[in-house]
Image: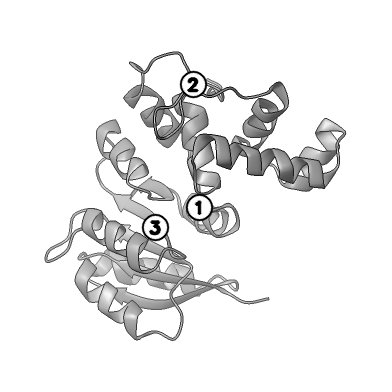
């Protein structure tokens, strides 16, 4: 099985080298590039034969910070999923980066086990939103209207089945698991998922999760 390829951008040398050493210990992970600022990492990725699967990015760096690097990667290498690593745990930073398309946001004192889980989940599902991420997103949108609207602010209606599928997606259930739980075929599940993408205007699974939290279709368990 191919390894999950990873790039790191962080101007704290000890942290970056330590993180690289931890990644090297995992049999299914491979560090392919590292840099102390966003521009340097972007240049290194351009020289690789294939863009990395996941980029672990510090938010505050010289030359090009994590916000700018995330934007550049989304435009030039959309297949690379960005996970922000930051010392800042304020909800406004978290919600800002998730809104900007980051696939995850972790505080730098996060346990090693959760970091490795995040990398694998982001590669597998396209996102990893822990409790802090989901709470930050919910609070950021607490003044939204109750009417469900898509990304273009057009009112839409979701069927009960579509709502159910959307909740399962937020719970990181696979199509097969949803099929068994809902007693419908995998093809029908895929149809509901495609309808959700079309109705909401979301491009991927992570976008659907954000949409569900924004409209309180998926609520957090305390």
**Residue at the spot of label 3:** 82
Residue 90 seen by the camera: yes
The image quarter in which residue 9 lies: bottom left
The residue tagged 1 is: 118
Percent of width and height locating residue 10: 25, 64
- In depth, the one of 61 and 98 nearer the eye is 98
Secondary structure, mark 3, is: strand
Query: How many numbered marks appear?
Result: 3
Badge 1: how crowded within 10 Å, few (<14), some, or many (20+)? many
Residue at the (33%, 53%) spot, across then down: 85
Percent from the top left, x then y, of residue 161? 73, 27
Specify whether residue 172 is in view: no
Q: CA distance from mark 1 to mark 2?
A: 29 Å
In the picture, the disc for residue 50 is none
Callout 2: few (<14), some (14-19), or many (20+) C-alpha neighbours within 10 Å? some
Residue drawn 25% across the image and 46% down it: 87
- In the visual, does 120 lie left or right of 87? right
Left or right for 14, reference 105? left
Residue occupying image coordinates x 12% and y 66%: 63
Position of residue 179 measured from the top left corner of the image (x, y, whole percent): 82, 40
Report crowding for label 3: few under 14, some 14 to 19, many 20 or more residues within 10 A (C-alpha).
many
Q: Which mark is residue 148?
A: 2
- Of labels 1 and 2, earlier in sequence is 1
142 over 179 or under it: above or below? above
Mark closest to the chain's N terminus, 2 or 3? 3
Q: Nearer the viewer, mark 3 or mark 1?
A: 3
Tag in front: 2 or 3: 2
Q: State the image coordinates of residue 189 (x, y, percent, origin top left).
A: 76, 41
Q: Nearer the viewer, residue 165 or 56?
A: 165
Which residue is farthest top?
146
Cβ atoms under marks 1 and 2 closer than 8 Å? no
């Amino acid at each position: 099985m191919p390894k999950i390829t990873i790039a790191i951008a962080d101007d704290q040398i000890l942290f970056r080298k330590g993180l690289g050493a931890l990644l090297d210990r995992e049999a299914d992970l491979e560090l392919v590039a590292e840099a102390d600022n966003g521009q340097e990492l972007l240049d290194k990725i351009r020289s690789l034969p294939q863009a990395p699967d996941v980029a672990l990015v510090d938010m505050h760096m010289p030359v090009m910070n994590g916000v700018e690097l995330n934007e550049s990667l989304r435009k030039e290498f959309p297949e690379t999923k960005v996970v922000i690593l930051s010392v800042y745990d304020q909800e406004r930073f978290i919600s800002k980066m998730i809104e900007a398309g980051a696939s995850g946001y972790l505080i730098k004192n996060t346990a090693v086990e959760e970091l490795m889980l995040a990398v694998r989940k982001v590669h597998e599902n396209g996102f990893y939103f822990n409790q802090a991420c989901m709470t930050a997103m919910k609070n950021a949108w607490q003044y939204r209207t109750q009417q469900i609207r898509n990304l273009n602010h057009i009112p839409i209606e979701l069927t009960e089945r579509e709502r159910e599928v959307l909740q399962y997606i937020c719970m990181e259930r696979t199509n097969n698991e949803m099929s068994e739980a809902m007693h419908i075929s995998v093809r029908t599940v895929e149809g509901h998922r495609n309808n959700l993408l079309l109705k909401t205007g979301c491009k991927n699974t992570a976008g659907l999760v954000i949409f569900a939290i924004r409209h309180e279709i998926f609520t957090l368990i305390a």
